[in-house]
Structure formats: structure tokens, C-alpha cells
Image: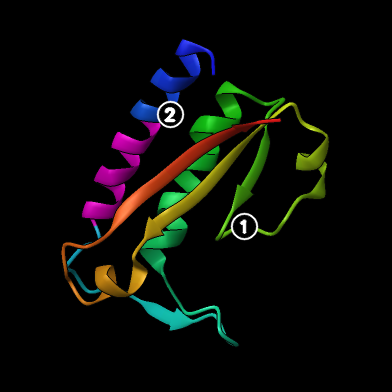
Amino acid sequence: MPADDLALLTAAAEAAGLVALGYWRGQLKSWDKGGALGPVSEADLAVNDHLEAVLRAARPDYGWLSEESADDKSRLDARRCFIVDPIDGTRAFIEGQEGFSVAVGLDEG
């Protein structure tokens, strides 16, 4: 991974954490995605939107795969692909617990 990609991922994840903390332990809207997919919250979507805006603007030729975005199969043709779980530990987040994180990675295939 190019060093500037690591710096980009780090900065984006840290900023996304601040977005998440703006919702944490507040009046949070959440709902079940249905099936066995589990819960999602407005914070998940806000963090996802933030990460997508920052990362795709910086690397428009990279693919995008996120738990909270519709799958875009064009990612399969990209040399590199961002892989995102905006809030890993959504149940804990919704309950106001500390066991959650912003998960951001980069696949180079």
C-alpha cells in the first residue's frame, strides 16, 4: 500500500470517529435491516457518507465496498478497493457501550 494511502485512511478513520461520537449516547435513530443483517443507525449512515465522500474524492479510481452502501460490482475491476464497516459494533454503539470502532481497509488485488 502506498504510504499516502495509509495516511489518507488514518485521517479519514479519525475524522469518521468524531462523526460517530457526535451521535454516541445521544437520541439515536436505529432500525433493523431485516433478515439476519442486524441493526443499523443514523450514525452508521452518517459515518459511511463521510468516509465515502472523503475517500472517493481522494481516490476516485478505487473501488468501494461498504456494509452500508449498495454493492457496486465495478469495484471488482479496480486495482484497489476501500472496504468499510462504518461502525463495527453497531449494537454496542446503539446501547451506548464502548465496544465499537470505525473499520476502514484497503484491498490491493
- In the rendering, at what x and y percent does residue 53 appear? 53, 37
Colour convention: rainbow
- In the rendering, at what x and y percent does residue 29 appear? 35, 76
Q: Which residues are magenta?
A: 12-22
Q: Is residue 3 left or right of residue 36?
A: left
Which residue is rendered at x = 27% and y = 59% of the image?
Answer: 100
Q: Which residue of the protein is positioned furthest toward the bottom in this rendering?
A: 35
Residue 75, by quadrant, is top right
For marks 1 and 2, give the CA distance.
Answer: 18 Å
Crowd class of label 1 (few under 14; some 14 to 19; many from 20; radius 10 Å)? some
Q: Is residue 14 left or right of residue 73?
A: left
**Position of 75 relative to 72 (above/below):** above
Query: Residue 105 shows which numbered tag?
Result: none
Which is more toward the observer, 87 or 27? 87
Residue 16, by quadrant, is top left
Residue 54: say if magenta.
Answer: no
Mark 2, residue position? 9
Which residue is rendered at x = 43% and y = 21% of the image?
Answer: 6
Main secondary-structure element of the magenta-colored stretch: helix
Residue type at mark 2 is Leu
**Position of 68 relative to 26 (above/below):** above
Q: Is residue 81 left or right of residue 53?
A: right
Q: Secondary structure at mark 2?
A: helix
Q: Secondary structure at mark 1?
A: loop
- In the rendering, at what x and y percent does residue 47 appear? 41, 51
Closer mark to the observer between disc 1 and disc 2: 2
Which residue is rendered at x = 77% and y = 31% of the image?
Answer: 78
Mark 1, residue position? 69
